[in-house]
Image (tube, rainbow, N blue to C red):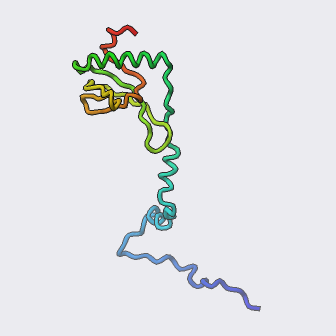
């Protein structure tokens, strides 16, 4: 009976060929050649979007609504003075349920009662229905 030989037995002991023309490739570059390709394009982005958290919009109590309404009425009377005000408002997320609370400090340009917008001298329009708090030095004169 014949002894079974390995088909590459004659070259198994031969050293790996090298060239002096090019330097050897780094391990990292060699590994990158065999890395899997992204078969599902956009899958990573979808996972990141799902993991991104948003805040739920909180409902104001009746007392908070009354105080906010009085502050808005007072600002409407003082709008010609362009008072400085800090607005806390809810900005809905365009991609998923919820959103984020934003705080903006600027000067009041107008309160557009028809479009229900709070307009600032800095060019920002904030929907009145999204405002949850208003702060201004003017409110020290107001009895809440």
- In the displayed orientation, state which residue is furthest to the front: 114
Residue 100, located in which quarter of the rendered image?
top left
Along the viewing direction, whichever of 135 and 73 lies nearer the viewer: 73
Q: Is 48 left or right of 118, judged from the image as shown?
A: right
Residue at x 32%, y 30% (from the top left corner): 114
- Residue 129: x, y in percent? 41, 29
Q: Position of residue 50 (x, y in %)?
A: 52, 46
- Residue 31 in the figure: left or right of residue 103: right
Relative to residue 77, is residue 11 depicted above or below? below
Quadrant housing residue 67: top left
Residue at position x 53%, y 80% in the image: 14
Q: Is residue 16 above or below residue 131?
A: below
Q: Which quarter of the rendering shows the N terminus?
A: bottom right
Judge whether 3 appears above or below 36 on screen: below
Q: Residue at x 58, y 85 (%)?
A: 10
Up the image or down, 74 lies above or below 98; here it is: above
| 52 relative position to 122: left or right | right
> In terms of depth relative to the viewer, which is nearer, 7 or 90?
90
């Amino acid at each position: 009976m014949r002894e079974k030989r390995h088909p590459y037995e004659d070259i198994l002991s031969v050293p790996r060929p090298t060239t002096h023309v090019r330097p050897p490739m780094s391990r990292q570059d060699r590994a990158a050649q065999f890395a899997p390709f992204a078969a599902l394009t956009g899958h990573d982005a979808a996972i990141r979007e799902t993991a991104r958290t948003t805040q739920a919009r909180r409902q104001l109590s009746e007392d908070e609504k009354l105080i906010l309404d009085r502050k808005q009425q007072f600002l409407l009377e003082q709008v010609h003075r362009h008072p400085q005000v800090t607005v806390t408002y809810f900005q809905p997320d365009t991609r998923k349920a919820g959103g984020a609370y934003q705080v903006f400090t600027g000067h009041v340009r107008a309160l557009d009662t028809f479009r229900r917008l709070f307009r600032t001298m800095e060019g920002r329009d904030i929907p009145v229905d999204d405002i949850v708090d208003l702060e201004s030095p003017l409110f020290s004169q107001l009895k809440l």
